[in-house]
Amino acid sequence: MLNVLKIAVRNLARFGRRTLLTSSLITLGIVGVLLFVAVSGSFKTIMIGQFTDSMLGHLEVHRKGYVASIDSLPLNLNMQPAMVAKVEQALQGMDTVEAYSERIKLGAMFSNFTETTSIRINGVDPAKEIATTPLLPGRLIGEKRAGALLNPGEILIPELIARGMKVKAGDTVVLVATNRDGSVNGKTFTVAGVLQSVSGPSGKDGYITLEDARSLLRMKEAEVSEIAIRLKNPAQLDAVYAQLSKELGAVAGPGTATATGSGDKPASAGGGGGGLEVHTWADLSPFSSIVRMIDLLAVFIKIMMVSIVLIAVMNVMVMAVYERIREIGTISAIGTPPRRILSLFLTEGLLLGAGGAALGTAISLAAIYALNIWKVTVHFGMGQAILLSPAVSVRDIVTIVAMVVIMALLASLQPAWKASRMDPVRALGHV
Amino acid sequence: MKAAMPLIRAERLVKTYRTGEVEVHAVRGVDFAIESKSFVVFVGPSGSGKTTLLNMIGCLDHPTSGKLTVIDTDVGQLGRRAAANFRGEHIGFVFQDFNLIPVLTVYENIEYPLIMVQDWPEKKRREQVMRLLEAVGMSGQAGKRPDQISGGQKQRVAVARALATNAQLVLADEPTANLDHDTAYRVIELMKKMRDEFGTTFVFSTHDPKIMGAAEVVFTLEDGGISKPSEKALEKAEAVHA
Ligand SMILES: Nc1ncnc2c1ncn2[C@@H]1O[C@H](COP(=O)(O)OP(=O)(O)OP(=O)(O)O)[C@@H](O)[C@H]1O
Ligand SMILES: [Mg+2]
């Protein structure tokens, strides 16, 4: 086998310029793909980070059915305290979870005493919310005041309402909300700050404290609309999602029954939406379709690269076989088994692909390293410039290199097969 | 004493090429026998069927009819793969255009069949190649590529390659056609010397009457038939049957 390799290398070296040209084409393809994967991956990570870190969290837990009718923020689908306790217990047992934050979501009327508009409000524990969505404080417009982001009796209002209603920090406003029994209640708040809008769900919501939300809604129990969860490592999303879904699935049984207080019939416990459900940020955000587009684009670029490899290698190998017909006739005449001839040309194609792939990987890694040193920034939405930190995983590299090598093999298969099947007399007579 | 089975025996051997409507009778029912360790030439003008005959003996081509036995094997019946095995096992080839592998050195060209056709262990390979390099007088050029040596030298290397696997039979179709007369003569002499040294049967072809003089058995081909065995062939045949 070593000798097949040696002959293949020498033949490639013999037509050095052609070999160089072809392998640089493959190199170019690999560089294109790896750079795209690295940069788009970084871009994706940043965009996803914007959603997960400024409003959604990585995962959210709701009562079953809540998300389906999330537009109306249904108060009757809030989680009961016992359910919340179960979720918290599950989360505290998972070391993949960095933080979580309970929220009460409600729709209210917002009044500056002269005008009224509707507003969506999140009632949160500010410390837990910041731990779960660390970019939230960064969305504050204007000077940061000293002390807590949000105190009881205060409200953070979205930019759009601040502008439309001409309200600024320090002003007093009124929120009026209808609770689940239909009774109306009002409460005054001091504007603690104005939040920059971000695109996506909850990107234009106001924030008050959890206690204020409960008193505004006159809740008797410590209900919660959703629990947002932040992971230590976003890459573990799928695993944590699966684990949490499993654990909370168990809660949905007898646990739910106790929670809703209808103890004797666990199966139908809680009536409509008795159980809990877990959603990833992607389930909750329209941005996931953009992510899918980026992924699709990557697939497309990979297909292009694969085609380049296929055509380039096939072209060279067809030529290599054609040029060496007499040589093939010779080695076939003296008794070289067809499979050896096959492997001779396959090895040549393989080396061509592998060489180009190795060089391409090296160049890509260098380029990615350079991009990280030069600090390329992008502007996303209205936010400040965000530093791209492109990176490729070993898995990406291995997959792409494997793809190229397999394609190079496939591309040489037909010419190599033809060479191995050649009739020696006719091949020897070839001029 | 009865003579042993000849190395090659042809009986009413026929090869007809058919291209569309046209039939070319390249070999028209020839009979001959070639003894082991003999030094045989087929002579004849262009188109007389020399290449066709050698290709059939070398299992590169099938006879149309008749019987051809080479080293106790009915080679007319061999399939593609069996023929390739048979060639690799028993037959060495020397070509008119030398046909050395351009990317391999002289040494590696001789070594080639020991790696790619048969699987010789490294040490045995080296011994065999060194011995052959010595025998064909190319020891000093072992590291050179084919394009760095002369035509005569290339053909010496080709002879060494043909002998590498200890083949019993070496076939050479016009091995001297691309060489000047002196060089040609020396290559033929080398082949004869190899026959003496290794006991290999050499069968070659030429249309050069001066070269044929070096052969011990001469078959003259004319339009696909063997016209008459030469003097030497008769002498040899008598000697064998005596
Ligand atoms: N593949 C083929 N198809 C058709 N006819 C062929 C084929 N090969 C050889 N012939 C014909 O068979 C006859 C014998 O050819 P062959 O090549 O055996 O002659 P040769 O004695 O080797 O000639 P030369 O000295 O020119 O090499 C010629 O008439 C030739 O045209
Ligand atoms: Mg000929």
Image (cartoon, coloured by chain):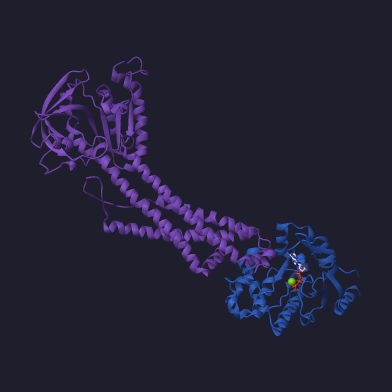
Question: Relative to B124, is A68 on the left or the right?
Answer: left
Expressed as whole percent of the image width and height from the top left, the position of residue B185 reads: 73, 82
Q: Residue at x 36, y 54 (%)?
A: A35
Expressed as whole percent of the image width and height from the top left, the position of residue A422 reads: 66, 60
Look at chain B in the picture and name its colour. Answer: blue
Quarter occupied by residue A49: top left
**Residue closer to the observer: A284 or B71:** A284
Q: Quadrant of ligand 1?
A: bottom right
Judge whether A364 appears above or below A94 on screen. Answer: below
**Residue closer to the observer: B25 or A278:** B25
Quarter occupied by residue B74: bottom right
Question: Relative to A272, is B108 on the left or the right?
Answer: right
Question: Relative to A189, is A295 on the left or the right?
Answer: right
Which residue extends farthest front? B21
Q: Please count the marks in the image.
A: 0
Residue A203 appears anywhere in the view: yes
Which residue extends farthest bottom? B182
Expressed as whole percent of the image width and height from the top left, the position of residue A395 reads: 41, 49
Q: Residue at x 29, y 56 (%)?
A: A372
Residue A392 appears anywhere in the view: no
Judge whether A178 appears above or below B15 on screen. Answer: above
Quarter occupied by residue B109: bottom right
Where, quadrant-wise, is the N terminus of chain B in this rendering? bottom right
Look at chain A in the picture and name its colour. Answer: purple
Which residue extends farthest top? A264
Judge whether A266 appears above or below B59 on screen. Answer: above
Expressed as whole percent of the image width and height from the top left, the position of residue B135 reads: 68, 78
